[in-house]
Amino acid sequence: MLKRKLKDQQNLILWNGKYYVVNDLTFELIDMFDKKIDIKEIERKTGYNKKELNILYAEIEEKILLKDYYENNLNLETPIKIQWKITNKCNLRCKHCYLGKLDGFELPYNKVKEIANTIINSNVMEITLSGGECLTYKGIDKIIKKFIDNGIKVDVFTNALLLKDLLDKIDSDLFNKEALLFYVSVDGLKESHETIRGKNTFDKTISNIKYAIGKGYPVVTNTVINKINYSDIIDMIVLLKEMKVKDVQLSNLIVQGTADNSMKISHTQQLALKEKINDLYQNHPEFGFIYYSEVPDSDGLRKVYSLSKDKKEFIGNDNWKCTAGVARVTIDSDGKVYCCPFIKDSYLGDLNKENLSEVWYNKNRYKFLKRLSEENNDRVCLAIKQKKKGEEE
């Protein structure tokens, strides 16, 4: 569990993949619970008896665990999370890539190391490394290890072709494997995946996912649904879940870059797929959850669903809020920082010239937050509303 001190009696914690604002006692109680410390030892350390502790833990469950980190009282001096597109280079040319043709630009390692240091010194709790293909960056193993050694959780977005090479370099030095999460792109079964991503990619991707899981690292997969792989989705979910992938995520095509409208499935097909997934989970409750992103429903809004055997939950039904500029920013491959990578007038500054704390207070951030509060009052992404990200139905 990671902790960041906000002010007296207020801590931001990352626990079980979610953020919470808690006081010192609550943090201490959750930490001891997490470490499975005996109740008598908790009584001794806190001075509370068993009955009082039961009441306190019940209050935590009722009041704390129902809240996420988008609380109005959370006024951050620096961001919690960073997405860093560490390179604009990629080893594939995927048919559905919303980034389009990449120029291959990346900063030299010494400059990347400086940016890593300013992130560490800014008390960031979680970083997502992406690209391009971030594992093509020479020295990425050192950057990942540097973050983890400084108590920062690292999420890596990758096509996994270089995943085994990375793990062979860093595995022996990492003791907290839960601090490193891999998001791997899998776009259907073999024929579909290779039609989209290129020949000889599927088997290596699957093999490297198995390798990472075998080493004890959590792996989440993401699949961009399109006409090429639509018929594969159910069988692909079964394959991935049987491999012990932590979560399977499905997302819709962003019509941008190399992707065009000819690859989009219809609204009817999207809804039919959701029902097929529901049916699948009636037969495989052991699969846990699958996340189906941005499904247009009968009301015309795109929604995120968490699907399982007994539950179809619209995630964030009443309280979803975008965290761009609120709790996270994006760093581009050239070191420039944005609240939202799709909305270029949310530009905050350049880490080649400024540190993260300085760009966080750029006036453009406050303009963006004002726009976010005025326009982002439903589940629809602001970038989609402004036609900066894909196209409307």
Image: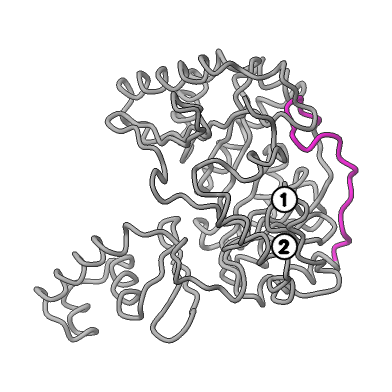
- Residue wearing tag 2: 143
Label 1's element?
A: loop
Camera-side residue of 78 and 113: 78
The residues bearing labels 1 and 2 have C-alpha atoms spaced at a distance of 22 Å
In this view, the mark in front (1 or 2): 1
Marks 1 and 2, the one that precedes in the sequence? 2
Which residue is located at x 36 percent, y 37 percent? 313
Q: Residues within 10 Å of mark 1 (few under 14, many from 20)?
A: many
Which residue is located at x 76 percent, y 43 percent? 133
Q: Amino acid at mark 2?
A: Ile
In the rendering, at what x and y percent does residue 137 appear?
A: 80, 51
In the rendering, at what x and y percent does residue 208 appear?
A: 63, 37
Camera-side residue of 349 and 152: 349
> Is 85 drawn above or below residue 14 in the view shown?
above
Looking at the rendering, the stretch of residues picked out in magenta corresponds to 93-109
Which residue is located at x 9 percent, y 73 percent? 51
Q: Quadrant of residue 274?
A: top left
Which quadrant: the C terminus? top right
Q: Residue furthest left?
A: 51
- Residue wearing tag 1: 341
Q: How many marks?
A: 2
> Is 52 drawn above or below residue 106 in the view shown?
below
